[in-house]
Image: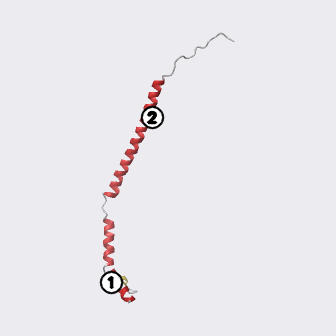
Amino acid sequence: MSDVKIAANEDKPYNGALLVISAVTVITAIVTFVGVDALAGWAQEVEFAEKVESRPFYDLDQLRTQQNERLSSYGWVDQEAGTVHVPIDAAKQMVLDEQR
């Protein structure tokens, strides 16, 4: 064999520095994940509050008012056919009277 010796790199890795860099990277990733999750939750709450909680229920209130007016009044369903609607309380009483 040849007598030529190849010099090996005698430098040893800095285990302490490698450990610190790895720990900082892992901690940064965890903090970033937790921060993004918290920010997403906050943004979702804000959007929910804007779209749902702060919006008055005018449409629902208006619908209920219309339904209550129809249930408590007389009116035509089909005037040509002679079909009418009566207040709900009167209709209940008519049904009870028919069953007696």
Measured as percent of width and height from the top left, residue 42 is found at 36, 48
| Quadrant of image for the C terminus | bottom left
Q: Which mark is residue 90?
A: 1
**Residue 37 vertical position relative to residue 91 in the rendered view, above or below:** above
- Please give the residue where the numbered disc 2 appears in the rendered image: 26
Residue 62, can we see it? yes
**Disc 2 to disc 1, how far (Cα)?**
74 Å
Q: Earlier in the sequence, mark 2 or mark 1?
A: 2
Question: Would you say 57 lies left or right of 15 here?
Answer: left
Task: Indicate the position of residue 62 as horizontal and vertical percent values.
Answer: 31, 69
Picture layout, residue 65 above or below residue 38: below
> As rendered, which of 36 and 76 lies closer to the eye?
36
Q: What amino acid type is highlighted by mark number 1?
A: Ala
Q: Which mark is residue 30?
A: none
Three-letter code for the amino acid on which mark 2 is drawn: Val
Local packing at callout 1 (Cα closer than 10 Å; few below 14, some 14-19, many 20+) is: some
What color scheme is it? secondary structure
Q: Nearer the viewer, residue 25 or 57?
A: 25
Q: Residue at x 37, y 45 (%)?
A: 39
Where residue 25 sits in the image (x, y, percent)? 44, 33
At 40% across and 45% down in the image, what residue appears? 37
